Amino acid sequence: MKLESPHARVHDLARQAALTYSQGNTAQTESLLSEMSQASKEVVGILEELQLLV
C-alpha cells in the first residue's frame, strides 16, 4: 500500500482546480474536482486498509 502518490495527486488536483476556477473555467474545474474526489476515495481506501493492519 502506497499512500504518498495518491495523496500528492489529491493536492495537485486541488491546486489545479483552484487555478482553473480563478480563471473562470468552471467546466475544467468541475472535471478536476471529480478527479480529485476519485483520488480522495483511493486515499481513504488505503487508510482503511492500514487501519485493519493496526
Image: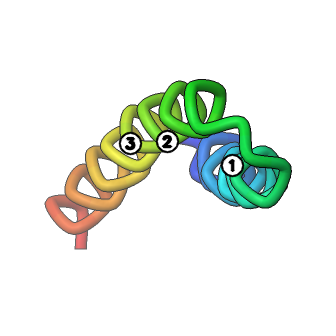
Q: Earlier in the sequence, mark 1 or mark 3?
A: 1
Q: Cα distance, mark 1 to mark 3?
A: 12 Å
- In this rendering, is residue 24 above or below 31? below
Determine whether label 1 and label 2 are within 8 Å by CB.
Answer: yes
Q: Secondary structure at mark 2?
A: helix
Residue behind mark 1: 17
Which residue is pictured at 73% across the width and 60% down the height? 18
Residue behind mark 2: 33
Residue 47 found in image quarter: bottom left
> Could you tell me residue 13's position as x and y percent?
69, 45
Determine whether label 3 and label 2 are within 8 Å by CB.
Answer: yes
Amino acid beneath label 3: Ser
Q: Crowding at label 3, few (<14), some or many (≥20) Cα neighbours within 10 Å?
A: some
Near-viewer residue (53 or 31): 31
Which residue is pictured at 59% across the width and 38% down the height? 26
**Residue 37 — which label?**
3
